Amino acid sequence: EELTERVGFHDEYAENFEDVAANIFAPIYPVISQQIINRCQIKSGNFIDVGSGPASLAIALGEIVDGKVYAMDFSEKMLAIAKRKIESFDLNENVIPIFGDVHDMPFEDCFADLIVSRGSLFFWQNVPEAFREIYRVLKSGGMAYIGGGFGTAELKSKITQAMEKRDPEWSKCVGKRLDRTNLESFKKALHVAGIDPYTIIDDESGFWICLKKVD
Ligand code: SAM
């Protein structure tokens, strides 16, 4: 079961996820992007949203930063949806959809000032390898903000109510992703990847790993 969970964000979920992201999750992305900027204090340069899906976070970030935001995903279907959405926000110049797998990212070493990722790490097949790859792509002094969550307790409770109506299994699924054992496994993965120091944010904004490349 663990394996299907990790492997399984298949293309066929793309349309359904876009519908959920556009209609139910929409208000979380501006809140989360502002939290990221407040916490990381990086407002210009090259940004990457890893596992960006319909690019909701990349777009929200693109609206408040200077520079380019690369919306990277390994699902062609998600990228097609992202492209349409970026066009509808008239952000083609700033938000760039790009095909790529977190385990082998299509960016040169030391490219990014800030790498963000929401709700994607639960599906990565080799989390230490993914962290190493993210670290490689970061500039020295660059930061990564990776995790999952809904921004505030109020947003989480509103979304939980709406999602429970669509899918009674939803809370169970989210609870499993964010359970202690799973969170501990991410800390272990950071250790295996040799990444230190990092900060864990575990509060009403969600569960986020915040790391800075130092060398
Ligand atoms: N970040 C978006 C959001 O918060 O709205 C989408 C989250 S969705 C739950 C997870 C996304 O991660 C999917 O679009 C999936 O295709 C992508 N993903 C999963 N594994 C990936 C990998 N190894 N490399 C790149 N993208 C991946």
Image (cartoon, grey):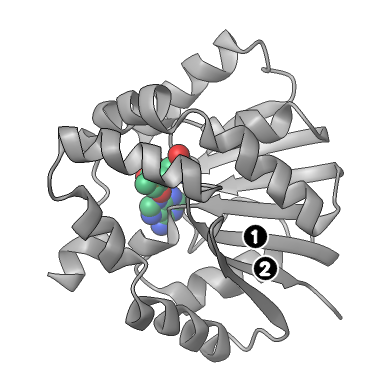
Q: Residue flagged by tag 2: what amino acid is it?
A: Cys
Residue 7 spot, x, y in % from top left: 25, 60
Badge 1 vs badge 2, beta-carbon distance below 8 Å: yes
Q: Quadrant of the image for the C terminus?
A: bottom right
Residue 108 spot, x, y in % from top left: 72, 56
Question: Which residue is found at the position 69% from the left and 79% from the top?
Answer: 198
Apparent side of residue 160 relative to residue 187 in the rendered image (left or right): left
Residue 75 spot, x, y in % from top left: 36, 39
* Position above or below: 128 against 84: below
Residue 162, by quadrant, is top left
Q: Mark 1: which secondary structure?
A: strand
Q: Which mark is residue 104?
A: none
Residue behind mark 1: 145
Question: Which residue is found at the position 62% from the left and 28% from the top?
Answer: 59
Q: Quadrant of the image for the N terminus?
A: bottom left
* Position above or below: 100 against 53: below
Residue 73 visible at all: no
**Other-residue count near label 1 (Cα within 10 Å), few / some / many at <14 / 14–19 / ≥20:** many
Residue 121 spot, x, y in % from top left: 43, 62
Question: Which residue is found at the position 48% from the left and 25% from the top?
Answer: 82
Apparent side of residue 49 relative to residue 79 in the rendered image (left or right): right
**Other-residue count near label 2 (Cα within 10 Å), few / some / many at <14 / 14–19 / ≥20:** many
* Position above or below: 22 against 106: above
Residue behind mark 2: 210
Question: Which residue is found at the position 57% from the left and 19% from the top?
Answer: 86
